[in-house]
Image (cartoon, helix red, strand yellow):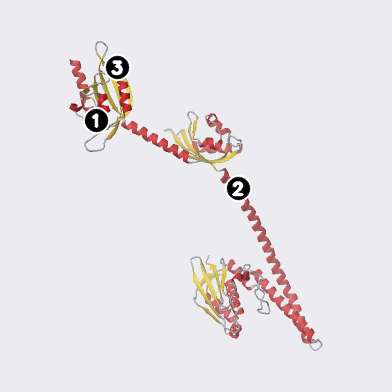
Amino acid sequence: MVANDYFKKLFDASNSPCLLLLPDAPNYTIKDANKAYLNALNLTKEEFVGQSIIGYLSTNSIGLSSDHVSKLQQNLNKVIKSKRFSKLLAHSINKVEGDLEPVSKYWDVEDNPILNDNGEVELIVHELRDVTERELTLIKLQQSHERNEYVAKATSEVIWEWELATGKIVWNDNFMKLFGFTHEQMELGHDFWVAQTHPKDSVRLKDSFAKATEAGSEYWKDTYRLKNAKGDYLTIEEHAYILRDNEGEVVRMIGAIRDITEQEYAAKILGELNADLQKQANALANSNKELEQFAYIASHDLQEPLRMITGFLHQLQSKYKDAIDERGQMFINYAVDGATRMKQLTADLLEYSRVGKIESIKEEFEVSDSILEIETLYRRRIEEQNATIHLDTPATIYTLRTPFRQLMQNMISNALKYAKNGVPPVIIITVKEDIDDWLFTIKDNGIGIKQEFFNKIFIIFQRLHTRHEIPGTGLGLAISKKIVENLGGKIWVESEPDNGSTFYFTISKT
């Protein structure tokens, strides 16, 4: 009796939810329930004790599946048959608290038989062990594992995990897809992997890996070549996270491999193309330099012979004027005109070849000062044509003064040259400052240009009119374009025949 009282006190005081069940299979009637059990399911003894545990769990909405109820009954049957302890691993039961949503708890079930003097099962202690924290952790781990599997499937990268203690390496399916090795080959581990590394990369790779692991690094990354099942080398980029124990020793590594063979091949081809382009650019630069030197030498050296020819022709024309008939005079005039034009052409070529060659220092100056110099230079011509030159927006700029003055001189000269007959030229110049450059606009009321010739007029020796219509060598705008480009800008034109032209050019501030 004392023993029974002592057991009863222990049963009631236990923190583990417990039931006393009668061995009356298949019902297993509930003889008693301790406070911990009643609180766990929010029950009272009156509504619970005396019922069949199997019947109650089957008919009440406490979240226990029929499969778990069946397993519980089988576990109790096993206890009666074996007369020994038996355990049923985690199942969930909902605890209902008033009108609140049920709270799921996970329990292990331990059934312990109490035998009578005859060795028969008299009672079964049905005890619940709260393993909710353990089960929720396992669920999170499973979910995390599933996410990792989905990520591995979604990516083309090879994902691996290496346990250094055992040497075992676990790969995802992309390993076989990328390299073509079998499961048996994959299970050979790290030594098999090293054997596939390109001989020229193996020593460097070994040193790189040793440096990362011995220096206490958390990450390792390298690029090398690895042989696939067909014997072809792929260029791969591999990076890994290094896990260490409390002593700092590497115990595990998790990493990923990405095939960059195509990118490396594309980079190689691009490098070769760039090298070829650079060779061509150098050859073109040398060719242009030689042409410019030739133009300079030719135009410079031709000046003296042309001056001599022109001088002798003028003397011939002056001294022997009466001895030469009208036809001879005409021939002399042709020769003088040709020599004069050749002299102007060589002078323009010399100027063209000098663009960008004369060293100069940038300075700050007023645009109006340069315009005034040009007006003084062309004063007679401006008066003869009754021309008007107006700077609409005065500005201070910072650039090379001499090339800029030459550029403006060419543009104003061009506007005066292509004026309409009998119409006084009006030239309006505007300047607009932008973030990176100055934009100049030179608008005239001249004869205009057809759109099809907008690009042609900036090419050397390209003329739209005969020398009898409008004199010139076809170098003025070509020189202007070269000056603008040397000043870090660009030049273009908008125009309509008989409606004048508007030339635009920019000059870089840097």
Q: CA distance from mark 2 to mark 3?
A: 78 Å
Q: Report which residue position mark 1 lands on.
A: 41
Task: Point out the residue furthest to the bottom here.
Answer: 322
- Pointer 2 with pointer 3, Cβ within 8 A: no
Residue 217 appears anywhere in the view: no
Q: Considering the numbered disc 2 on the image, is that residue within a helix, a strand or a loop?
A: helix
9 in relation to 99, above or below: above
Q: Considering the numbered disc 1 on the image, is that residue within a helix, a strand or a loop?
A: helix
Q: Between 390 and 470, which is closer to the camera in this rendering?
A: 470
Quarter the N terminus occupies: top left
- Pointer 2 with pointer 1, Cβ within 8 A: no
Residue 4 appears anywhere in the view: yes
Crowding around mark 2 (Cα neighbors within 10 Å: few <14, some 14 to 19, many 20+) is few
Q: Earlier in the sequence, mark 2 or mark 3?
A: 3
Q: Report which residue position mark 2 lands on.
A: 268
- Tag in front: 2 or 1: 1
Q: Earlier in the sequence, mark 2 or mark 1?
A: 1
478 in relation to 143, above or below: below
Crowding around mark 3 (Cα neighbors within 10 Å: few <14, some 14 to 19, many 20+) is many
Q: Considering the numbered disc 3 on the image, is that residue within a helix, a strand or a loop?
A: helix
Q: Is residue 118 left or right of residue 315?
A: left
Query: Which numbered dot is residue 80?
Result: 3
Task: Point out the residue furthest to the top here.
Answer: 118
Give the residue displayed 26% in from the left and 28% down from the top: 59
400 in relation to 470, above or below: above
The amino acid at mark 3 is: Ile
Q: Can you give x and y, in whole percent of width and height, for residue 167 in the image? A: 50, 29
Give the residue displayed 75% in from the left and 75% down from the top: 305
Q: Between 390 and 90, which is closer to the camera in this rendering?
A: 90
Q: Is residue 286 left or right of residue 118?
A: right
